[in-house]
Image (spheres, helix red, strand yellow):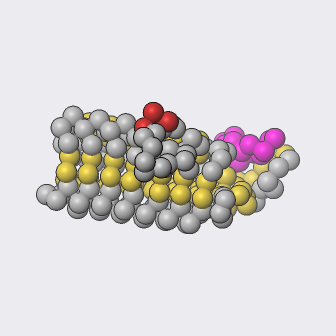
Amino acid sequence: MKFKKHETSIIDEGAEIGNNTQIWHWSHICGGAKIGSDVSIGQNVFVGNKAVIHSKCKIQNNVSIYDNVCLEEGVFCGPSAVFTNVYNPRALINRKHEYKDTLVKKGATLGANCTIICGVEIGEFAFIAAGAVVNKNVPSYALMVGMPAKQIGWISEHGEKLDLPLSGSAQTTCRHTGKIYKLTDKLVSVIF
């Protein structure tokens, strides 16, 4: 496999890294990590032994992707986004057997300095605003802000806020792509 890494980064033996992936300064990839192709890993990023990063993800500077975190294709992690893997950590108590799975689905965006509490699932193309704290599951295409994060709207695959209510039945068209989004029972789907 052909990937690029800066001379200051550390890649432990056994790590799986796909073609055209770039790993920048002072990053550490643990031996059990699985990283797809065309991934950009910024400066000072840590990827744990049981972390999975699918193709075309962009991980900005200062992000730690701990064990049991899975990023599907095309996930964007803004600078200093935070993941956890234990819900109630203590320095004096070993809780590695309590790691919770966190799944970030295809195309989702995690804004700068947001925090993702372990055990949640973030839906496809959801958008988590900078500084938000996510402590529950997030539906696909949801726009989330605040601490704790709450949904304030819906967002397109292009990254534009959609003219849809939070619940009910409605549909709208993305002005950039022409895709039609339909809301039914608090869930959004693309119908064209």
Q: Magenta part of the protein: which range?
A: 174-192
Q: Quadrant of residue 48?
A: top left
Q: Percent from the top left, x then y, of residue 178?
A: 64, 53
Q: Percent from the top left, x then y, of residue 15?
A: 25, 38
Is residue 133 toward the left or the right of residue 55 in the image?
right
Q: Percent from the top left, x then y, of residue 53?
A: 39, 42
Between 155 and 48, the residue placed more toward the observer is 48
Q: Residue furthest right?
A: 168
Residue shown at 54% from the left, 52% from the top: 116
Q: Report the label total.
A: 0
Q: Residue furthest front?
A: 92
Would you place residue 57 above or below residue 159 in this image? above
Is residue 20 toward the left or the right of residue 57 in the image?
left
Residue 133 in sight in this render: yes
Is residue 97 toward the left or the right of residue 136 in the image?
left
Residue 104 in sight in this render: no
Residue shown at 13% from the left, 57% from the top: 7
